């Protein structure tokens, strides 16, 4: 292993090369900083751990989606228990190929001058003052950075080292199956058996992603609940029986953590899931990841340049952009969970109160600023 004196040096180390990390690396490199970004997985976006829906509003935040776009979405149907579906018209967005999407963002980061390394998991991060800013990779490489950006997911090692961990998580499971007829809507399934989450169908051309999320303590129920949903959709003649892919993962649902602090004496910023920016109700996180990643990259470069206020400004921007919408979603989610008292379960009205398609979700909140996730900032009538 290299000693501290032999550590690779860089201005900014970005941990994670998903949408947040790639966006951070690109922005910091554009600002003239030396940027090294590391990713534990071998390839961008793989394995896919995402339902792959991106809201139309992201068009203002990214270059054209290009070949990563699979199809458009124009409405949402919400099924509550056995009731007839409620239609939310004009719910616009895109279904994407997430692996291609991530690869395109990495290409932009590299074009801006960032060095990107894959198959490079972080093994440890030094928190001592004498060696703060030193990150050890699994292959023995030691990296000394002036600033660290943690964009390394809901169980962020950077966040843990900084003392800012996501404490509340939802566990998910998803399969990809054949879609038997063209479809341009998203289907949402609310059911008291799906504790702390919901189920979904998102179409992707001739295939679709179906899945669900539940509180971590109910993770053992994911497989049977998903099997039941799959069988229901097969019986309705909507999807095929063959399963082409499985995936799953954790989603942070506790709201903002960090997003700025220190590991030892090293300034550290968190972005995307690592900063808890996924919406606690919808699970939407791609838009927030891209926006926060860009802001983190800009702030990291400013810190390197001597701006003493950059970390605080980053925190203020994150709160201004996402704070109110995440707080409302967290409140609604907890209100639904509070209905599980003793043997009680939430009824249809409780479930509707906690979902973005219904006006009562927004009843005691002002219209929210745009850009706070998967289109959920729009007041939905």
Image (cartoon, helix red, strand yellow):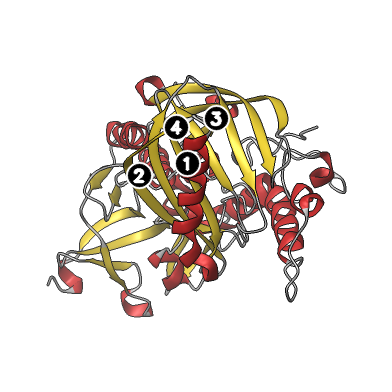
Q: Is residue 68 above or below residue 30?
A: above
Q: Nearer the viewer, residue 32 or 38?
A: 38
Q: Nearer the viewer, mark 2 or mark 4?
A: 4
Q: Residue at x 65, y 51 (%)?
A: 281
Is mark 1 in CB contact (under 8 Å) with mark 4? yes
Q: Residue at x 60, y 55 (%)?
A: 197
Identify the disc placed on residue 58: 3
Q: Quadrant of the N terminus?
A: bottom left
Q: Report how far apart the C-alphas of labels 1 and 4 lie in the structure.
A: 10 Å
Q: Is residue 105 above or below residue 92?
A: below
Q: Helix, strand or loop at disc 2?
A: loop
The image quarter in which residue 136 lies = bottom left
Q: Bin the neighbour count of mark 1 within 10 Å (Cα to Cα): few under 14, some 14-19, many 20 and up.
A: many
Residue 79 spot, x, y in % from top left: 67, 40
Q: Nearer the viewer, residue 370 or 357?
A: 357
Q: Bin the neighbour count of mark 2 within 10 Å (Cα to Cα): few under 14, some 14-19, many 20 and up.
A: some
- Looking at marks 3 and 4 on the same chain, the residue that comes earlier in the sequence is marked by 3
Identify the disc placed on residue 48: 2
- Looking at marks 3 and 1 on the same chain, the residue that comes earlier in the sequence is marked by 3
- Looking at marks 2 and 3 on the same chain, the residue that comes earlier in the sequence is marked by 2
Q: Is residue 69 above or below residue 312?
A: above
Q: Residue at x 61, y 40 (%)?
A: 188
Identify the disc placed on residue 264: none
Question: Does residue 232 appear left or right of residue 21 in this picture?
Answer: right
Q: Helix, strand or loop at disc 1?
A: strand
Q: Report how far apart the C-alphas of labels 3 and 4 lie in the structure.
A: 29 Å
Is mark 3 in CB contact (under 8 Å) with mark 1? no
Q: Nearer the viewer, mark 2 or mark 3?
A: 2
Q: Report how far apart the C-alphas of labels 2 and 4 lie in the structure.
A: 21 Å
Is mark 2 in CB contact (under 8 Å) with mark 4? no
């Amino acid at each position: 292993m290299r000693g501290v004196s032999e550590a690779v040096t860089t201005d900014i180390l970005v941990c994670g090369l998903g949408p947040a990390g790639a966006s951070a690396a690109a922005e910091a490199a554009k600002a003239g900083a030396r940027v090294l970004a590391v990713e534990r997985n071998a390839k961008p976006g793989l394995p896919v751990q995402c339902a792959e829906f991106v809201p139309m509003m992201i068009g203002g935040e990214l270059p054209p989606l290009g070949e990563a776009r699979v199809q458009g979405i124009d409405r949402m149907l919400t099924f509550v228990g056995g009731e007839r579906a409620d239609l939310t018209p004009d719910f616009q967005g895109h279904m994407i190929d997430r692996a291609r999407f991530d690869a395109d963002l990495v290409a932009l980061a590299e074009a801006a001058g960032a060095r990107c390394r894959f198959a490079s998991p972080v093994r440890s991060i030094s928190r001592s003052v004498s060696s703060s800013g030193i990150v050890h990779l699994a292959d023995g490489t030691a990296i000394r950075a002036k600033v660290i950006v943690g964009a390394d997911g809901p169980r962020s090692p950077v966040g843990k080292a900084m003392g800012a961990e996501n404490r509340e998580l939802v566990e998910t499971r998803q399969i990809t199956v054949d879609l038997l007829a063209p479809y341009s809507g998203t289907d949402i399934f609310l059911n008291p058996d799906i504790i702390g989450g919901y189920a979904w169908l998102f179409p992707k051309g001739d295939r679709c992603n179906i899945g669900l999320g539940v509180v971590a303590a109910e993770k053992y129920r994911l497989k049977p609940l998903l099997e039941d949903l799959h069988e229901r959709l097969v019986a309705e003649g909507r999807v095929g029986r063959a399963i082409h892919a499985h995936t799953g993962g954790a989603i942070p649902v506790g709201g903002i953590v960090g997003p700025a602090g220190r590991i030892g004496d090293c300034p550290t910023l968190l972005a995307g899931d690592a900063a808890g920016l996924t919406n606690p109700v919808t699970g939407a996180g791609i838009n927030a990841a891209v926006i926060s990643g860009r802001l983190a990259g800009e702030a990291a470069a400013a810190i390197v340049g001597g701006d003493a206020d950059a970390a605080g400004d980053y925190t203020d921007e994150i709160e201004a952009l996402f704070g109110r919408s995440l707080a409302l979603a967290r409140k609604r989610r907890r209100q639904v969970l509070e209905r599980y008292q003793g043997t009680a379960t939430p009824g249809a009205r409780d479930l509707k109160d906690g979902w973005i398609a219904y006006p009562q979700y927004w009843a005691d909140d002002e219209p929210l600023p745009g850009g706070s996730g998967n289109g959920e900032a729009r007041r939905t009538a």
